[in-house]
Image (cartoon, rainbow, N blue to C red):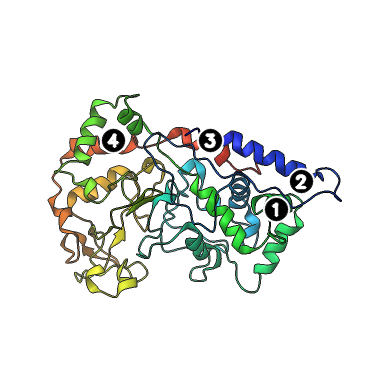
Amino acid sequence: MTHTPLRARVAAALALLSLAACGGGDSADAGPPPVPPAWAWSLPAGLAPPLVPADNPMNAAKVELGRHLFYDVRLSVNNTLSCAGCHAVNLAFADGRAVARGATGQNHPRNAPSLVNAAYQATLDWSNPAPRTLEQQMHTPLFGEQPVEMGVNDTNRDAIVQRLKDDARYPPRFAQAFGGEAMPIHWDNVIKAIAAFQRTLVAAGSRYDQALAGTATLTESEQRGQRLFFGERALCAQCHSGPNLGGGAFVSAQGRVGEPGFYNIGLFNIGGTGAYPTNNRGLLEFTGRPEDMGRFRAPSLRNVALTAPYLHDGSVATLEAVVALHAAGGRVLGNGPYEGDGRANPYKDPRIDQIDIDAQDQADLVAFLRALTDDRMLARPEFANPFVP
């Protein structure tokens, strides 16, 4: 299959939008906006396109519209926060905070996960097991009230959409992205456009990927770390598996591989009861089963070197500390409300205690994890903030 470069597809869409914005000729003869061409994925060999919902087909105009909306602070209640405020391109679409912070200053109980390759994940939440599309997931940050993130609600949602209608740049973009709709600027299409953009955030060009393709060679330390990662002493690939190296089941246009994985790694053991903090109890919050206490989804490790701090609550600052925590079989906390020995948590995954790695092994693992960074992705202009020259 011949793939049109993404930059060329976006440029073509922008040309059409410019024509629409300028009138495009005699308005009396103008018909409905032309239907944009179907999207042609440009992906590394062997990587299938992500699964795309039938009711939200991809096209270049929609992706470019989604990029603008992703970076537009006017989608928040007080014009202060965009999607990119919690998912910054230079941080592999994470935010560098321990926990995310909403438009009104309210902290989220969880760390903002990276959006890299999110289109391939069957589950899109730290602890919600329900398979969800990017479109469905977006309702939480937009409309959620506990905690407030973007702060859209029944009293302001129409006014926020009006901000887009009042910007002369948006009506032609929506018309081109959603050709055939008489009034295309509404929340459903806002969500669809942002989801289309998010589906393009694919990373598969790290030095690890290049080594697999035979176009690069990992250092000796990185190679040792790779063997450990996929071997029986470190057991990393037991939970961080598939093309995404974690993140639960991998779903593409070719089908589904694996099942979502939720794990308790012994991070807490409050009072020796196995308990986790009340606002972060993991899968138990959805199943009600005691054995699901503290179980969270294993995140994708792609670009993981850029997404510190780590874990569901952002409580571990460095890759070195995360690897050491796993090697120790959990974490010990004292002199505080969370006091307890996580190594003895009765709900901890038994594989954590089977990890057998020394200090050199840990250093090699960290070296390999750093080789999972796709630097070229971070510099792609089609992922950048369109409102910044």
Q: Quadrant of residue 152?
A: bottom right
Please tell me how crowded label 2 is: few (under 14), some (14-19), or many (20+) other residues with Cα within 10 Å. Answer: some
For the residues labelled 2 and 4, say whether their Cβ atoms are less than 8 Å apart: no
Q: CA distance from mark 3 to mark 1?
A: 26 Å
Location of residue 133 in the rendering, given as x and y in whole percent from the top left corner:
45, 59
| In-image side of 199 versus 271 (left or right) | right
Please tell me how crowded label 4 is: few (under 14), some (14-19), or many (20+) other residues with Cα within 10 Å. Answer: many
User: Which is more N-terminal, label 3 or label 2?
Assistant: 2
User: Which is more N-terminal, label 2 or label 1?
Assistant: 2
The residue closer to the viewer here, 83 or 137, is 137
Q: Which residue is mark 4?
A: 368
Q: Amino acid at mark 3?
A: Arg
Q: Which residue is mark 3?
A: 380
Camera-near label (3 vs 1) is: 1
For the residues labelled 3 and 1, say whether their Cβ atoms are less than 8 Å apart: no
Q: CA distance from mark 2 to mark 4?
A: 49 Å
Q: CA distance from mark 1 to mark 2?
A: 9 Å
